[in-house]
Amino acid sequence: MAAVPLGIATAAIEELVGLAGEKTPYRSSRSLAERDVVQSMVAQAEAEVRSGRAFLREALDDVWSSAERGDDISLRQRALVRLAVINAW
């Protein structure tokens, strides 16, 4: 279920970046893409989405490795997967 919000967030960032080069706020001569605050906010969003995806992948890879070895999934592993999923939302 975490893949859906991560995908939506990625698509939203891509759409915003596409629009930012074309849109100029009312009474402004600079496009959204030329504004420092917009660049900063897009960068922050990109970092959060990529961090969330990396955290989820790491937690799931760990669980998958344990399962392939035939090991039990530990309580800590379960907690980290749950935390990664919640973080992705």
Image (tube, grey):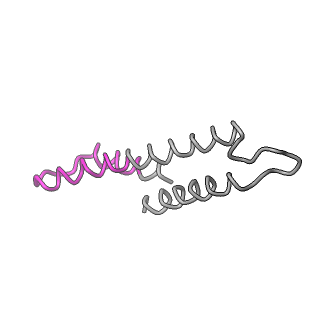
65 relative to 60 in the view: left or right: left
Q: Where is residue 83 in the image (x, y as percent from the top left)?
A: 41, 47
Q: How would you classify the magenta stretch by its main secondary structure?
A: helix
Give me the residue at 81% from left, 50% from top: 25
Give me the residue at 50% from left, 59% from top: 5
37 relative to 74 in the view: left or right: right
* Circle count: 0
Front residue of this view, candidates 65 and 25: 25
Front residue of this view, candidates 75 and 51: 51
Give me the residue at 67% from left, 57% from top: 19
Location of the N terminus by quadrant is: bottom left
2 relative to 33 in the view: left or right: left
Residue 39 occupies quadrant: top right
Q: Give the range drawn in magenta.
A: 55-84
Q: Where is residue 23 in the image (x, y as percent from the top left)?
A: 74, 55
Q: In this view, does 39 lie above or below 18?
A: above
Residue reaching furthest right?
27
Residue reaching furthest left?
69
Give me the residue at 72% from left, 47% from top: 32
Front residue of this view, candidates 63 and 33: 33
Q: In this view, does 72 lie above or below 48?
A: below
Front residue of this view, candidates 39 and 5: 39
Q: Where is residue 48 in the image (x, y as percent from the top left)?
A: 51, 43
